[in-house]
Amino acid sequence: MKLLYQTHSPYARKVLVAAHETGLAGQLDVIHHETSPTRRNEAVYAVNPLGKVPVLLLDDGEVLFDSGVICEYLDGLHGGPKLIPMQTAARYGVLRMQALAQGIADAGIAARWDIERRPEALRWPVLVDAYREKIAATCDYLEREIDEGAVDLGTIALATALSWIEFREVYDFRAGRPRLAAWYERFSSRASMQATALSGATHD
């Protein structure tokens, strides 16, 4: 299988961390592709009309995109503990955590666009504050609710989202949140996270 990847994407990293956690990383040929909303990557557009990574190219020619879809597919390929539980209550708890993590990443990326990448005359600080407020409220919720022992798709998504907002210095999620900060440090020490560190700059 080929994984079209980007070394500084929280969504692509989520997939690769999941692959490591399920023992499938060795079955992936990881190929870095630079993409951004203003940079058209023809190789990526050829397989994903959204022009975004991650994209998983299966050996039978099928193409999967969106990190959640790819992770669910990979979770069906291994015989170990599932990243997305089958039991209803546990399953939706994990998917809810993934949704929170997706929201953190989405808000962080939108904020960074306005902080660093939009022409200065067009920036809107009020909007950046609103995006950061969403991240802060979510992190406050997680400070109370984080399951410190869970390793599943929800916590993988959360760790990779938090790693991105810290990598890009968008928001300090650690401040005033000792439980969340301690959980992140422990999760970040996992081999799957150590093997997939974020790197690189965005190219437009």
Image (tube, rainbow, N blue to C red):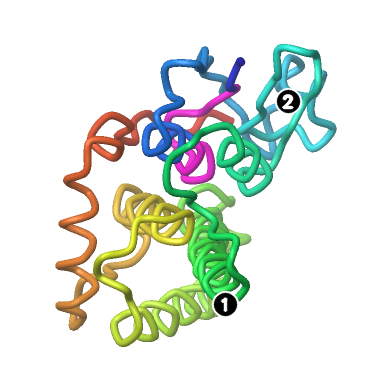
Percent across and percent down for residue 105 are: 50, 58
* Front of the two marks 1 and 2: 1
Residue occupied by mark 1: 89
Q: Is residue 3 above or below residue 98?
A: above
Residue 101 place in picture, x, y as percent: 49, 63
Which type of secondary structure does the marked residue at label 2 adopt? loop
Q: Which mark is residue 55?
A: none
What residue range appears in magenta?
A: 4-15
Q: Answer above or below: position of 151 versus 20.
A: below
Q: Quadrant of residue 151?
A: bottom left
Q: Quadrant of the C terminus?
A: top right
Mark 1 vs mark 2, CA separation in Å: 41 Å
Count neighbours of disc 2 (C-alpha within 10 A) and say few if under 14, some if 14 to 19, many if 20 or more: some
Residue 14 located within the stretch drawn in magenta: yes
185 sits left or right of 148 in the view: left
Q: Residue at x 46, y 51 (%)?
A: 116
Residue 43 percent location from the top left of the image: 73, 15
Q: Residue beneath label 2, please?
A: 40
- Foreground pick, 114 / 150: 150
Residue 80 drawn at (x, y percent): 43, 40
Picture quarter with the N terminus: top right
Write the residue at 78% across / 13% down. 60
The disc labelled 2 sits on which kind of residue? Arg
Q: Quadrant of residue 195?
A: top left
Is 105 colored magenta in this rendering? no
Q: Amino acid at mark 1?
A: Ala
Helix or strand or loop: what does disc 1 sit on? helix
Q: Which residue is located at x 43 percent, y 85 percent?
A: 137
Instruction: Please tell me in which quadrant of the rendered image residue 175 appears.
Output: bottom left
